[in-house]
Amino acid sequence: MPVAPAHAQDDASFQSFLAQLRVQARSQGVSERTLDAVLPSLTLNQRVIDLDRQQPGNPASTAVPPYAPYRIAHVDAQRISRGRAAYQAQRWRLRKIEDETGVPESIMVAIWGNETNYGVVMGGFDLPRALASLAFEGRRRALFTEEFIGALKMIDNGVPRSKLVGSWAGATGGPQFLPSVYNRLARDGDGDGRADIWTSDADTLASIGNYFVNAGWRRGQPWGVAVNVPAGFDRSQAVNRMVSPRCPRVFQRHSGWKTMAEWRALGITPQSRSWPADNVLATLIEPDGAGNTAYLLTGNYRVILDYNCSNFYALSVGLLSDAVAQ
């Protein structure tokens, strides 16, 4: 018996898998109209599967690289300049969102800048096709099945099919929201009745602000402050004895919690900005090792980590926010 080429077998298996997705989506309330419009158009995208398989692992034995090269690349003069321009252009709108949410204007701009370079780079992958292909591959089937069905719900709720483009892993629009996040947290910022995070800067910024409120941002508290650690500082006084169930490698780089008053008593000094209130709790991170700039991080830093659980990312958002607001 002749054997069909592997890609033909994959395509046939993919079409069979789509039939299963149809049943799951229908059970979650997706309309037949949307199912009939989207599913027959989908083909397997091997490219997104290959990209997913190329993602680096993070074995516990891998040394963490220094932060400085990442900071130089992501908090650079061009990104700061573009951020300041966007900040000034959107001030009237940002001020309103900050008044409503408590999320600083510059933090919203910094997220926008880190995610899509202020709406310039939002990805070109067809989301339903990419997400269905990743669900089919199976390594993270539950996640990508949920996001695929979320994309169908977006169409059901009036988002044009043509808008559903983004990163290979399913993030879309100015804030780079996954479909499930869009369905929960996207907001209409310009009053036209739609949450258009692809072409409306107002909707993008309002949606970022709403995400941060939902993640627990505390009004009036900074994300953190750059500090100097004195020579001879006894780090055993600030050991973190907690193990986070989420992103443990990220959080194990932080010290234990102390108040700002306690850190000051241990000889920690700010590099520029004033201290937060004495009773504000913070952890210490030294991303480039002893003798280099360190940071005291408040609970609001954890909110940035909720957006992307990476110390390098969150530090860059905080530093870009500070630079944009100057």
Image (cartoon, rainbow, N blue to C red):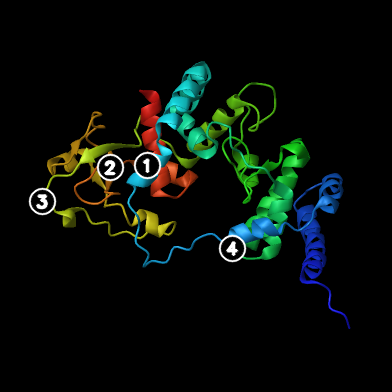
Q: Residue at x 80, y 70 (%)?
A: 9
Picture disc at residue 295: 2
Asked whether the residues under the numbered discs 1 and 3 touch, taking CB atoms below 8 Å apart as contact, a structural biologist would say no
Q: Which numbered mark, 2 or 1, is in the foreground of this view? A: 1
Around disc 1, counting alpha carbons within 10 Å, would you say few (fewer than 14), some (14 to 19), or many (20 or more)?
some
The answer for how far apart the CA atoms under marks 2 and 1 are is 14 Å
Q: Residue at x 14, y 53 (%)?
A: 234
Picture disc at residue 53: 4
**Horizontally, is 206 left or right of 228 in the view?**
right
Around disc 4, counting alpha carbons within 10 Å, would you say few (fewer than 14), some (14 to 19), or many (20 or more)?
few
The residue under label 1 is: 71
Judge whether 1 appears above or below 166 on screen: below
Which of the 4 quarters of the picture holds residue 16? bottom right
Q: Residue at x 58, y 41 (%)?
A: 176
Q: Which of the two discs, 4 and 1, labels the residue nearer the N terminus?
A: 4
Which of the 4 quarters of the picture holds residue 206? top right
Please, what secondary structure does the residue beneath circle 3 have? loop
Check disc 3 and give the amino acid type: Gly
Q: Which of the two discs, 4 and 3, labels the residue nearer the N terminus?
A: 4
Asked whether the residues under the numbered discs 2 and 1 touch, taking CB atoms below 8 Å apart as contact, a structural biologist would say no
Q: Which numbered mark, 1 or 3, is in the foreground of this view? A: 1
The answer for how far apart the CA atoms under marks 2 and 3 are is 17 Å
Q: Which of the two discs, 2 and 3, labels the residue nearer the N terminus?
A: 3
**Horizontally, is 22 left or right of 262 in the view?**
right
Q: Nearer the viewer, residue 161 or 118?
A: 118
The answer for how far apart the CA atoms under marks 4 and 3 are is 44 Å
Residue 315 visible (yes or no) = no
Check disc 2 and give the amino acid type: Tyr
